[in-house]
Image (cartoon, coloured by chain):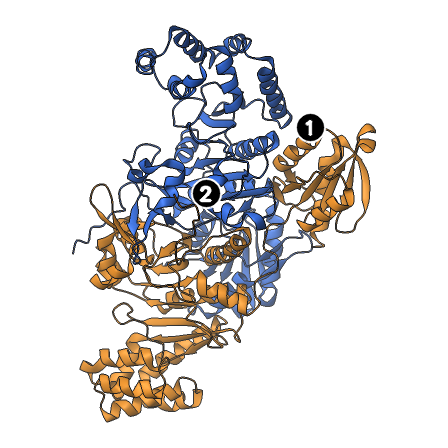
Chain colours: A blue, B orange
Amino acid sequence: MTVNFQAPKGTRDFYPSDMAVRRYIEDIWRSVSVRHGFQEVDGPTFESLDLYKVKSGDEIISQLFSFVDRGERDLALRPEFTPTLARMVAQKAAGLPRPIKWFSIPRCYRAEQPQKGRLREFIQWNVDFIGDASERADRECLAVCVDALLEFGLTASDIRIGWNHRELFTKALCSTFVAPQRISNAYYILDRLQKYDVQARHALYQQQQCTELERENFDAIAAAVNSPQLLAAWMNSWPADVRDSINAFEQRLADKGLAEICRFDLSVVRGLAYYTGFVFEVIDAQGQNRAIAGGGRYDKLIEMFGGPAMPAVGFGMGDVVLEILLRQRNKLPANLMPPADVFVINALEDSAAADQLIAQLRRSQWNSEHSKIIRRGLNVQTSYRSTRNIGKLLQEASGCGARVAVILAAEEINRGMMKLKNLVDRTETDVAVPDVLNRIHALLTDSQAMV
Amino acid sequence: MTVNFQAPKGTRDFYPSDMAVRRYIEDIWRSVSVRHGFQEVDGPTFESLDLYKVKSGDEIISQLFSFVDRGERDLALRPEFTPTLARMVAQKAAGLPRPIKWFSIPRCYRAEQPQKGRLREFIQWNVDFIGDASERADRECLAVCVDALLEFGLTASDIRIGWNHRELFTKALCSTFVAPQRISNAYYILDRLQKYDVQARHALYQQQQCTELERENFDAIAAAVNSPQLLAAWMNSWPADVRDSINAFEQRLADKGLAEICRFDLSVVRGLAYYTGFVFEVIDAQGQNRAIAGGGRYDKLIEMFGGPAMPAVGFGMGDVVLEILLRQRNKLPANLMPPADVFVINALEDSAAADQLIAQLRRSQWNSEHSKIIRRGLNVQTSYRSTRNIGKLLQEASGCGARVAVILAAEEINRGMMKLKNLVDRTETDVAVPDVLNRIHALLTDSQAMV
């Protein structure tokens, strides 16, 4: 038996410092979702293999980790959450209060070659607003995405959000240079415009059998993507109602405070089959990384999974590219480990008194009139080293973020006292044993203002 | 294509109210772990199939969901976390500060027939204390387990913890009635004593070819398990040093405040190959459910996975039996959904002003001098119904737990005001638009004491 095991290819071990980063990311996703009125859901880690074919067809199978259970059912690890979401909504559609505002933070799996920013196992934040066909739902999804990015400390110099509207844009394309039967070719080309250089673009035109008119217009679009002037000029050829709708949507984004970070972007079209209206993508403003998030309106999906006709809009954001970006831009807080509240130093021969104090502190209700904070249990740490060198132990206490140290030493204990050290202002007091708990709570309350 | 999909057998969909329960359970596991000084870790959801054979042999394979990746590697969904933990410790043993105090909350998978309390997909809290061979580490693990159970509101009438010590008990058995070569038979029988009735027990004795002496003693143990008098009498025949060690350990549990809930229990021996010393099990005191948690000392395991010799002790607690127990004993809080802070009621034709206010509140920093609480962003909800009936909307506001409602109506807005309603004491005030944010923060701070 080999005993030199590694984590499987494309997966990660989360040691405490890695886990603290993951926890930080997930906590922001969760708290931002909740404050925008979304409710958390989750589903099984694996589903029927067939579930994944509904949306993506048979070609998805090669990208799945699939297996067979004892009942010979074909199952697969989820590559994304949307099919599970659609199934859950379809199954209980009649009984769910509307609109359905759900988020989830599932681990997902792709059986593909790992690359920078793409692993075989990753975590993806999903936010979905179901049962509301209005632009208000589109904007709400965008707002929760932007709010999370801001909460991570990312600014308009780090990221930008390109948005588009499949239905309006189709109308604009068809009324200017794209024949209706060429619309899927047009989207195929548009999806690649920004990723290809001039030479590759021309090969693409040839492959898609573009007319001269199409070539000229696609070149114009490619140029307009990063130029507000060219974009405005090119949009002048659009039907007035399409322009008005785009402008009105832009104004509503401004009302939500999203003007700086969001931009109408012709190159954002996202995969063909799926989206039916508004689409958006979060893009690294410095062009270093893959898309950080993406989503849009998918009004037909719930029906495809056997549910009623229900409009829906949503997006996904993975943890892998996000973490790379946060590291590159120095946006991860320096110390993400939860700090200790109290550090107990035992300088007695026996540890019974220290054990008792530690148990008491960890289970104490901290309900201070002054701060109105109710907290159950303090985070108490102690040293496992054999040293009784108080100076070294106080260093260890500060190292784990404790604001108070309690020292149990023979001299004080014999007088019925323990020594309390405020590690913020470095003052010391001897406190009678029965008062220790209250004094620690008071010290922690006072020092809250200082941290 | 069938469009009537269900969650796979033995798995669960977590709709918002189910997810709130899962979040409640995981949050208590996490906060209790942290305050006892444990650090969170995690690993991949799947590992090399071979990793699971190290501890459990080939027979584990039939209980695994296994599959093959593109590189023809045999992989399996984790049935438990311990092999991953051992691999992670073994891989970085030299670089990890000791002792290693880790916890994790992984989802795990078993390819077996679902039963009450046993699903194919479940969540298991793992707590491990590695690198410390002392009884102190044993007691710390037990204390974190008990603390979580108390935090869930469970008491000595709901659960009890049976503990034993494999090494000491082996010594006691061998010095009284078990021949050394019969020790594994003895444990095989002891593990089943409490689960079998008299008839099944006698069949077991026959199958294990027990001597008359063994039969008498196993019967005496079975009777002593639930009788402190019989236990004390039977323990009188043990070597004095074994009895002293057991009594000393019991005293230290009492020092930690664990006397009421923990009991030395001869019937707790746990699987043979794995544990080397202290073992314990959390048992339903009313005998209705399977074991809620279990663990013990496993000093040889890290070595088996290629690491250095490192003593270790730990336990696991699954979410499935725990949730059943909490429901049976009415210990789940009534409403676990995160409450809203503010509910915005828009009675204007246009929603731009309401949208702006909502965005502002969700992104506001709430840094009150008075409370010293710093919170980023308020949980703001609003109605998606078409009604402008303020009474109905205020009901909706109270229903989602909001403590403050802001009403945007033409009459007030025309005077540059919004109406604030304190939903705790039902008072109303008109507030000038620029002051709304501060007034809401102040109202929320004041109402904190009342909820």
Q: On what subunit does the disc labeled 2 rest?
A: A
In the rendered image, the vertical position of residue B269 relative to residue A386, given as above or below: below
Q: On what subunit does the disc labeled 1 rest?
A: B
User: Identity of the amino acid at label 2?
Assistant: Phe
Q: Position of residue A39 (x, y in %)?
A: 56, 46
Q: Which mark is residue B245?
A: none
Name the front one of labels 1 and 2. Answer: 2
Question: Which is nearer the eye, A298 or B132?
Answer: A298
In the rendered image, the vertical position of residue B373 relative to residue B61, given as above or below: above
| Crowd class of label 2 (few under 14; some 14 to 19; many from 20; radius 10 Å) | many
Element at label 1 = helix
Q: Is B393 placed left or right of A234 in the picture?
A: right
Q: Are marks 1 and 2 on the same chain?
A: no
Q: In the picture, which quadrant includes the N terminus of chain B?
A: top left
Element at label 2 = loop
- Residue where numbered disc 2 is placed: A305
**Residue A335, quarter of the rendered image:** top left
Question: Which is nearer the eye, B388 or B434?
Answer: B388
Q: Is B127 placed left or right of B397 in the picture?
A: left
Q: Is A177 placed left or right of B184 in the picture?
A: right
- Residue where numbered disc 1 is placed: B352
